[in-house]
Image: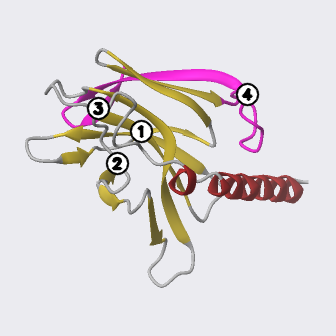
Amino acid sequence: MKKIIIIIIIVAGTVLVYAMRGNSPTETTKAPTINDTRAFRPDPSNATFIFDNEMITLSAGKNEKSIVPGSVLVEETVLMDKFAYGDLNADGKEDTVLLLARYGAGSGIFIYLAAFTSGPVAYKGSKVIFIGDRIAPQSLSIKGDAVTVEYLDRKPDEAFAAEPTVSASKQFIYKNGEFVEK
């Protein structure tokens, strides 16, 4: 019985990974550089972000790396299609808040919050903060100094193979190049 449950979870995770790949924001949605009012919007699709002290650089909104050197298994990091814009670092320039999805050899699809903020010379990616595994992001917003991520999750006793249906949100403050949960 345990083997059947494990197989079902693996199959469901694989289907979810391929479903997310089919809706890849790098193929269908790009972060705009000019909005309807002709204002500049920073584009993080080629930025470098920090995951647990490891730097990951996106190219056209995507990064692939071998899980083990020489292996055919890869870990992908993909820019999702959820963005919010505002001045996170109080320098008078617009910054971007975004979500990144990371997946690879396992069945998990890990969602992270990141920022692409202005600096003295150029824009820079931030350290990322983990939001959840196999969640369904709904929206991002910036209000004052708070960033809110709204998403669908599962009940605490539900398996990861279950479709996320429970509304949830997290709030963060951006300090010194990284997010702190509020």
Give the structural element (helix, strand or loop) at label 3.
Answer: loop
Quick one: label 1 or label 3, which is nearer the N terminus?
A: 3
| Residue farthest to the right, as pictured | 1
Residue tagged 1: 98
Task: Specify the farthest residue to the top.
Answer: 144
Horizontal and vertical percent for residue 124? Answer: 22, 47
The N terminus lies in quadrant: bottom right
Question: What residue appears at the point 62 percent right and 37 percent down from the top-left corner?
Answer: 135
Q: CA distance from mark 1 to mark 2?
A: 8 Å
The answer to which of marks 2 and 3 sits earlier in the sequence is 3
In the rendered image, residue 121, in percent from the top left (x then y), is placed at 9, 47
Q: Tell me if label 1 and label 3 are in contact, CB under 8 Å.
A: no
Quarter-of-image position of residue 15: bottom right
Q: Which residue is mark 4?
A: 165
Q: CA distance from mark 4 to mark 2?
A: 29 Å
**Are the residues flagged by discs 1 and 2 in contact, CB closer than 8 Å?**
yes
Residue furthest bottom as drawn: 70
